[in-house]
Every structure is written in structure tokens, then in C-alpha cells.
Image (spheres, rainbow, N blue to C red):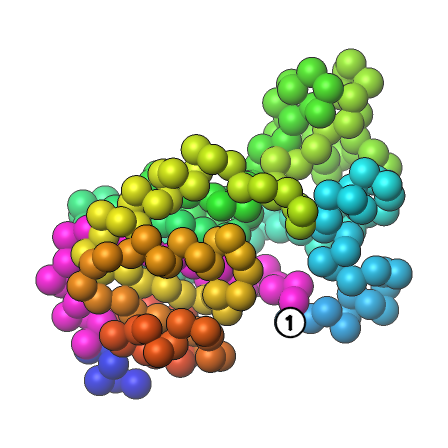
Amino acid sequence: MPEKVRQLKELIENSRHIVFFGGAGVSTESGIPDFRSVDGLYHQKYDYPPETILSHTFFQRKTEEFFDFYRDKMIYLDALPNITHKKLAQWEEEGKLEGIVTQNIDGLHQKAGSKKVFELHGSIHRNYCTRCHTFYPVEEIINSTGVPQCHCGGIIKPDVVLYEEGLDETVISGAISAISHADLMIVGGTSLSVYPAAGMLQYYQGNHLALINKSPTPYDSNADLLIQAGLGEVFEDL
């Protein structure tokens, strides 16, 4: 482990255009659970699995049940950035980080000070009326009951990408541009099993790919440096 971290540190020191691609494992150490890993817990309280509830079809057909789950399990405003978020923000400030491509919707990268963040799956902090497109902060969702409604009578929908929905084209193009210009790509805290997000790694043409994850991923054999550990442990050593 220390030897691999030393190798990673060396790669970071010799790179000028780093891109970090992260998933749920980045935020679990800030107290935000990965709903895939605790699926059984939710089954005790909800009649459907999270993947079903967080789908476009479910949102349309059982909107109130969607918001019950969303308020209960997807919003963590008290969560604070951890060592990984902070270190990435530091690298950006130092001019070493080209961008962060994240599958998370919690906004913790921005909370840590990062500005070049491509949120593939949207953000809990942006919400809009499906009828008149008025913008609402996350507090509007938290402080409402049932289905949150706009002053025009439309439904206020979180700007998060649900299952069955497509990714934002502007975010995709920005993420691809950053990835294709990177000289070091660090992938961390993701199983790389959710598409199309995971497919973005194909645009990386740089010299070194470092992969940090507790469990195996489909891309392990592509990594120049593979560290099977928690991100917090690795970034503390960095």
C-alpha cells in the first residue's frame, strides 16, 4: 500500500493536467451512503428498490412516493467535504487539476472549493418547475410536503438525472474535453458499472490511469496503477 501511494504521488507531481473521475465512494466518507450497498435497509421501509423509485417512469406515475424517498435518502445538507474533496480543490487551486467528473449529486466538491466540476447526474441543489422552468433551491424541496409545487401549479423537479433519462449534453461535452486533454486520470470510489458515465473513460488518451476502489471494477486491467483501498486512506497518505 505505501509503495503504491508513493507511485501515485510521483505521478501527481509529474502531471499538469489531472482529471479526477469519481463515484459514490468519494462521498461515503462524508456520511452519504451508497444506496446500492445498503439496498436491504431500504427494502424494510419502501415497497420498491431504489433503482425503481429513482426512475423517470416512477417519478411520473408515483410522484408523491418518489419525493418521500428523495427527501429521506438523497438529500444530505449537513454533510461536509472530506480529505478527498479538499485535496482535489487544492490541486485545482495549484493549477494541476483539469477538472472533476463526478457521478455524485451532493455538491460537496463545490463546497470544498472546486470550480471545474462536471456533474454527470445533476445536483440536489438545482431544482426547477417542469412547467414554467422557474429555479428553486433545495430548501424548497425539503420544506414542502407531498409533491412540491411551483407558484404556476407545475411540479418542482430536482435537476438530477433519473434512470431512463439522458445526460446533459453540455456537461458531457465539457467532461469529454477535460478527459481527452488530461495527462493523468485518477478514477476513484466508483464501480464503473453505471453507463453512459463509465463509458467516458474511453476518451482518455493520456499516459497514466490510476484506479482507486475498494472492490474490483471492469477497468482494473486497464489501470497503470491499481489501489484497492478506500479513497480517504489513500488521500490522507498523499
Quadrant placement of the C terminus: bottom left
45 sits left or right of 122 in the view? right
Residue displayed at 86% across by 41% down: 61
Residue displayed at 72% across by 69% down: 39
166 sits left or right of 230 in the view? right
The residue singled out by tag 1 in the image is 37
The stretch drawn in magenta includes residue 32: yes
- For the residue pair 237 and 188, the one nearer the viewer reads as 188
Q: Position of residue 77 (x, y in %)?
A: 60, 46
Q: Position of residue 204 (x, y in %)?
A: 29, 56
Q: Estimate how packed mark 1 is, as few (under 14), some (14 to 19) or many (20 or more) residues with alpha carbons within 10 Å.
A: few
Residue displayed at 79% across by 31% down: 148
Query: Residue 30: in sight, yes or no?
Result: no
61 sits left or right of 123 in the view? right
Occupied quadrant, residue 13 = bottom left
- For the residue pair 73 and 200, the one nearer the viewer reads as 200
The amino acid at mark 1 is Ser
Quadrant placement of the N terminus: bottom left
Magenta region, residue range? 7-36
